[in-house]
Image: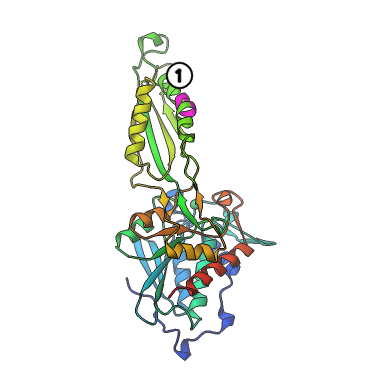
């Protein structure tokens, strides 16, 4: 909880010249060059794993601008980075800028940033070190701007572990912090997004009776039952889902991701298990989806157990776009209508804790997690412009 450095940027000896301004694409290259792979996707002892080194670098960078920074461990060697620009007068408004610091795994060349034309390539370039670079640039610019908001506290909450279990945002949300708006940094192509789908992992298990492979009529084949179940999910259940529509999110979906069954070819399998990824719309919960699936199986005379596997809920996001600060951000982004995205992120975690949350950032989610992740430098600069414009309009 201890600030690393506290400097008053308004004291003449601490005032920095404009030529110290951060350049977002240069900063992004520095961030890409410090791997921060989520340990869940790395082998034990992998030097690229963990968010600590990246957070140390950001803390040192922001501290140069007199910005107060804390590293709060959410697990050993895995901090959330919290930076704060406090208002000169009484706090009447608080806004949180919330990209994440972890990435998925990458090949060694992806940790060497590459600039080609308007693009920066590298692991995390758009998911979400691009947002991180944009937000840090804005914070540094505000620290150098004497006319910054006098009643608004601006927090950077750079979360660890978004890519796996969102331990960073979940821990932060539990701390009881209140805010008027959180802008979660994810690649939305610079669209202000007020809705995203939730995510469930559903395990189905069929049971049969083992028998010698030469006498299958003495057993009951759990894989055959599962095959029928999968067929029904792919056709009938999927068509039930596609009949549901949300104005920003379209339809919920289901996709079978894993299957396990049987032990050897000459034994009739007595058990088969699949795990399906079910993306939910606002209004659907773990409980309602499991209940619906059980009823669906019963109606189709299928026998399987159904259970939700996610250790923590990943609900959909459905923020009211009429909230004044959301309207203002839409206005700054010159966007008449809010957007919606399919992917889950930290926004729903913060929203569940009562913080109105939207998603916004440079880059395209289609380039995230892939072998050629990149972000446009123009988009980085535009993100800085939108966010700074928005923050400067606050009280
Ligand atoms: Zn991601």
Residue 384 falls in image quadrant: bottom right
**Closer to the camera, 287 or 81?**
287
Whether residue 98 is visible here, answered yes or no, is: no
| Residue 139 screen position, x and y as percent | 48, 73
**Closer to the camera, 286 or 126?**
286
- For the N terminus, give its image quadrant: bottom left
Which residue sits at x=37%, y=15%?
220
| Residue 70 screen position, x and y as percent | 38, 71
Residue 302 part of the magenta segment: no
Residue 187 against residue 4 in the figure, above or below: above
Q: Residue extending furthest right? A: 117
* Kind of element beneath mark 1: loop
Residue 291 falls in image quadrant: top left
Q: What are the residue bounds of the magenta stretch?
A: 231-235
Question: Along the horizontal axis of the image, is 224 left or right of 16?
Answer: left
- For the C terminus, give its image quadrant: bottom left
Q: Which residue is mark 1?
A: 265
Q: Main secondary structure of the magenta part?
A: helix
Residue 207 against residue 26 in the figure, above or below: above
Residue 78 against residue 57 in the figure, above or below: above
Question: Along the horizontal axis of the image, is 144 left or right of 69?
Answer: right
């Amino acid at each position: 909880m201890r600030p690393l450095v506290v400097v008053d940027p308004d004291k003449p000896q601490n005032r920095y010249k404009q030529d110290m301004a951060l350049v977002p694409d240069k900063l992004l290259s520095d961030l890409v060059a410090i791997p921060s792979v989520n340990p869940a996707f790395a082998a034990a002892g992998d030097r690229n794993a963990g968010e600590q080194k990246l957070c140390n670098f950001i803390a040192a960078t922001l501290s140069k601008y007199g910005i107060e920074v804390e590293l709060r461990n959410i697990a050993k060697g895995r901090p959330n980075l919290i930076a704060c620009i406090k208002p000169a007068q009484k706090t009447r408004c608080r806004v949180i800028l919330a990209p994440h610091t972890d990435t998925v795994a990458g090949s060694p060349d992806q940790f060497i940033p590459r600039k080609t034309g308007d693009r920066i390539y590298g692991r995390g370039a758009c998911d979400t070190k691009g947002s991180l670079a944009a937000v840090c640039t804005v914070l540094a610019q505000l620290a150098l701007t004497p006319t910054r908001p006098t009643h608004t506290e601006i927090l950077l909450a750079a979360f660890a572990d978004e890519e796996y279990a969102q331990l960073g945002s979940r821990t932060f949300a539990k701390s009881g912090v209140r805010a008027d708006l959180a802008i979660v940094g994810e690649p939305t192509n610079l669209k202000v997004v007020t809705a995203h789908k939730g995510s469930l992992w559903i395990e189905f298990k069929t049971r049969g009776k083992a028998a010698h492979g030469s006498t299958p009529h003495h057993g009951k084949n759990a894989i055959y039952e599962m095959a029928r179940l999968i067929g029904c999910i792919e056709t009938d259940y999927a068509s039930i889902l596609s009949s549901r529509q949300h104005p920003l999110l379209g339809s919920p979906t289901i996709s079978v991701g894993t299957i396990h069954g049987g032990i050897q070819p000459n034994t009739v399998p007595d058990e088969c298990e699949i795990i399906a990824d079910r993306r939910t719309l606002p209004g659907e919960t773990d409980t309602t989806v499991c209940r619906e699936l059980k009823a669906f199986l019963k109606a189709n005379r299928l026998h399987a157990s159904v259970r939700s596997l996610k250790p923590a809920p990943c609900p959909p996001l459905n923020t009211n776009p009429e909230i004044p600060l959301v309207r203002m951000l839409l206005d700054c982004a010159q966007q008449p209508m809010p957007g919606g995205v399919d992917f889950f992120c930290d926004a729903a975690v913060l929203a569940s804790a009562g913080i109105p949350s939207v998603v916004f950032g440079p880059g395209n989610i289609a380039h995230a997690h892939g072998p050629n992740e990149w972000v446009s430098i123009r988009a980085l600069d535009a993100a800085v412009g939108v966010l700074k414009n928005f923050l400067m309009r606050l009280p």
